[in-house]
Image: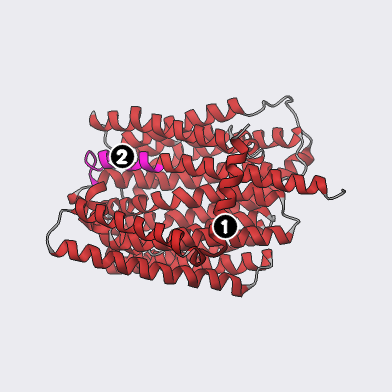
């Protein structure tokens, strides 16, 4: 009888995790489809140089915003015993750093634009300077929503803010000839909407002061997360920075669009899974058996989705670029194909990151992410001597190196057998090779007879659907424990929403 409360608590955590995963998956799916639609419009309204300005402004502002957050939200989520004092401390820390970040961008906008040699960047940085200040006050509310696994509300907030900002700000301003500023103002509006709604849906602070020990608790964990996050953000953006500086705005515009189109499908699954995994793993951080099982299942799901997706994107890249961006963006195809090879590594890094943060090993995470940033920078710099394609190859090599580093660390933390991980990866690599080979044969046949890109893409989607359903229906054993896990997730999700 003594085990009954624990069993009940475990089932409740599983139920809420499953519900949160499906809500975030749905949210990310809606945003992904919406992004594709808006990108199809904006790619025909803005030229590569304008997209490059937006990309560079996003690189700088994202780095500064990560500094302003100082890992406050993750510290709220991970803290085993959270008090009102911790929440108050987190609010003041975020507000102070938000002010510093805003002042930094306003003051150094011109020198930064001069350093990267991009005319028109300074005004964008001055506009976007308000973003870290606005978002800083919502770090505690965001952390509370995640800690309580209220992913339905998070999903609705993010979907609403993105859709409104793009539909009512980005596209109308682009049509009016605002150029790169259209996207920047849309980003500002989305931040305002998200911040207001997160603060509305979270419990308000009921006191104005906090013990110094609470500030120390938040800073200790948050600084480690922030260092890792800064390094990770630098790794995700330093390639854009170097390409823009050394290869020019047009090359950055092309590379940025390739990366944007690529990250849409990866976010559909990886972001939803990793966002749910961190608070769920944090809740069982002392139960290594459950932690190990959750990590293996998450890695298996990642491989099951990302490897066939990579095969599809590599084979159908010419048609996807033609449909989404238009025929004038043909230069995107090869960088897109190269980056698509690394989907497993990119999404897998998110899974490993969730595990590492959940166990509190943020110091080990920090230096690994710093190594990642350095390798991306080195790869992009050395590769740029071989033009844009060379830079893409360098970045892909760095992504795989980081995945290997993060995976080995995660295996050690979760006490997972190496053979179990190898079995998962090899099984889905084999499936992806067969999957991609079949798609390539069909696509090449249709291209040879001169079929329209839409016909090639539609036919390939149909074949991919038939192959996927055939595996699930007739040979589910190929999907191992992952297919059973999905069925349990669906079962738990359905139970959670029925009376």
The answer to whether 117 is drawn above or below residue 388 in the figure is above
The quadrant holding residue 457 is: bottom left
What crowding class fits label 2: few (fewer than 14 Cα within 10 Å), some (14-19), or many (20 or more)? few
Query: Which SS class for mark 2?
Result: helix
Q: Position of residue 447 (x, y in %)?
A: 17, 62
Which residue was labeled with disc 1? 484
Q: Determine crowd level at label 1: few under 14, some 14-19, many 20+ residues with C-alpha closer than 10 A.
A: some
Task: Report whether residue 432 is seen.
Answer: yes
Q: Which residue is mark 2?
A: 37
Residue drawn at point x = 43 percent, y = 43 percent? 29
Q: Quadrant of residue 74?
A: top right
Does 255 sit left or right of 5 as displayed? Answer: left
Q: Which residues are magenta?
A: 32-48
Q: Position of residue 272 (x, y in %)?
A: 52, 47
Q: Nearer the viewer, residue 205 or 431?
A: 431
Left or right of 415, for residue 304: left
């Amino acid at each position: 009888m003594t085990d009954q409360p624990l069993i009940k608590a475990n089932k409740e955590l599983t139920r809420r995790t499953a519900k949160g995963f499906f809500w975030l998956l749905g949210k990310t799916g809606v945003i992904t489809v919406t992004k594709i639609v808006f990108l199809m419009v904006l790619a025909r309204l803005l030229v590569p140089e304008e997209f490059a300005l937006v990309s560079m402004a996003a690189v700088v502002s994202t780095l500064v915003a990560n500094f302003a957050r100082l890992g406050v939200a993750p510290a709220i989520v991970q803290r085993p015993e959270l008090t009102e004092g911790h929440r108050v401390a987190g609010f003041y820390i975020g507000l102070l750093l938000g002010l510093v970040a805003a002042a930094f961008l306003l003051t150094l906008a011109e020198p930064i634009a001069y350093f990267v040699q991009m005319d028109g960047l300074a005004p964008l940085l001055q506009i976007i300077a308000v973003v870290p200040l606005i978002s800083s006050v919502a770090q505690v509310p965001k952390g509370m929503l995640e800690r309580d696994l209220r992913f339905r509300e998070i999903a609705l907030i993010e979907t609403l803010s993105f859709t409104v900002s793009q539909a009512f700000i980005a596209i109308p301003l682009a049509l009016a000839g605002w150029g790169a500023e259209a996207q920047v103002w849309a980003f500002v509006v989305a931040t305002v909407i998200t911040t207001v709604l997160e603060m509305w849906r979270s419990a308000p602070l009921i006191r104005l002061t906090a013990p110094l020990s609470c500030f120390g608790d938040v800073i200790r964990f948050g600084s480690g997360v922030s260092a890792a996050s800064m390094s990770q953000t630098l790794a995700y953006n330093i390639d854009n920075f170097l390409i823009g500086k050394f290869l020019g705005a047009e090359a950055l515009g092309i590379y940025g669009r390739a990366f944007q189109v690529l990250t849409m499908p990866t976010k559909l699954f990886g972001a939803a899974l990793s966002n749910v995994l961190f608070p769920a793993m944090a809740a069982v951080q002392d139960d290594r058996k459950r932690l190990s099982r959750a990590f293996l299942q998450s890695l298996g799901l990642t491989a099951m989705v990302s490897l066939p997706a990579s095969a599809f994107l590599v084979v159908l890249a010419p048609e996807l670029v033609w449909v989404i961006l238009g025929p004038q963006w043909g230069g995107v195809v090869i960088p897109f194909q190269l980056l698509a090879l690394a989907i497993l590594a990119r999404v897998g890094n998110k899974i490993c990151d969730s595990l590492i943060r959940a166990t509190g090993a943020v110091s080990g995470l920090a230096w690994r992410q710093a190594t990642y940033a350095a390798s991306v920078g080195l790869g992009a710099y050395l590769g740029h001597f071989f033009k844009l394609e060379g830079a893409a190859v360098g970045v892909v090599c760095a992504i795989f190196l980081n995945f290997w580093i993060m995976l080995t660390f995660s295996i050690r933390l979760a006490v997972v057998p190496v053979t179990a991980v190898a079995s998962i990866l090899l099984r889905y690599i084999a499936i992806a090779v067969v999957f991609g080979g079949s798609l390539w044969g069909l696509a090449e046949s249709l291209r040879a007879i001169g079929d329209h890109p839409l016909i090639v893409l539609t036919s390939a989607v149909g074949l991919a659907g038939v192959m996927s359903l055939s595996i699930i229906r007739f040979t589910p054993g190929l999907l191992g424990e992952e297919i059973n896990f999905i069925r349990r997730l669906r079962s738990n999700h359905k139970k959670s929403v029925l009376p």
